[in-house]
Image (spheres, rainbow, N blue to C red):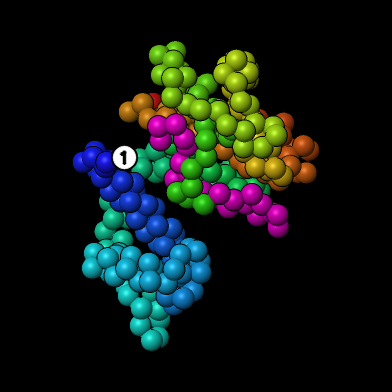
Amino acid sequence: MKKTDEDDALASGRQGIQVIARAAALLRALERRPEGLSLGELAKAVSLPRSTVQRIVDALDDEGLVLAASASSGVRLGPALLSLAAATRFHIAEAARETLEALAKECGETVDLSVLDQQKVVFIDQVAGTHRLTAISAVGVSFPLHSSANGKAMLAAMADDEIAKMKRHLRLPAITPNTITSWDQLEQEMEKIRSKGVSFDREENSVGICAVSVAIRSPSGELAAISIPVPTQRFKETEVELSRALIVHCDRLQKRMVR
């Protein structure tokens, strides 16, 4: 079959997306090792050939996003990321920071803030818990809407037209054996969330981890959620206490934001 210009364009587009994904994986690997990695270590960390990593590093180095390999320090994150980070401001995160800290201090658990990003939620801030065993999802990580406490809290806070749009595009794959995979069941869950004011993830996104969450809206209408992830063994004993604390603190935050 003869290839068309459209076929070539699609192939080029897929290749470009793959390069971006690989570059992002490389940057995340360096985020975990701020002291730097050798090219060989970096290739192993992202499961790519060293030659491929070298090409990506060279391109990122040209943009100042990494400092290229040297005999002493290897590859490190570059100075251009500082200006990008400075430009990345979430007003909802600034408003909610005090609430996250207060909740983490009160309950000893990790407390997360996430925002809606199309058909997923993205974590934008976090205060780590003080227990020896805690549940942590790094800032920048995304979760599906239907399988996470914060995602379901946001779905329950949406208007009917927003839900209708979601139903046309949002798939509900099974992440764990406990994941809700039908819209009928998910809408029943959303009614419970609206009634109780709080959403739960009972090992629906990760086996061994449960969570509780409450949705909030910024004055500009941005939808977000504060969540508390907890190892399952401890969650069973504390979910009522955590739910009450989360509802109280989120209610205070919501009232402060609309003043």
Q: Measured from the top left, where is residue 71 in percent x and y?
A: 38, 86
Classify residue 203 as left or right of residue 87: right
The location of residue 56, given as percent across then percent down, is 33, 65
Give the amino acid type for the residue marked by disc 1 in the picture.
Answer: Met
Q: Which of 5 and 210 is in front in this view?
A: 5
Q: Is residue 214 above or below residue 7?
A: above
> Is 149 one of the magenta-colored residues?
no
In the displayed structure, would residue 190 be above or below residue 141? above
**Residue at figure coordinates x 66%, y 37% from the top left:** 176
Q: For the point 27% across and 41% down, which residue is it?
A: 2
Residue 120 part of the magenta segment: yes
Left or right placement of residue 95 versus residue 155 in this view: left
Bounds of the magenta span? 117-137
* Residue under numbered circle 1: 1
Whole-percent x, y for residue 239 in the image: 71, 34
Q: Residue at x 41, y 62 (%)?
A: 26
Residue sitting at the far left: 5
Q: Residue at x 77, y 37 (%)?
A: 236
Whether residue 109 is situated above or below residue 65 in the rendered picture = above
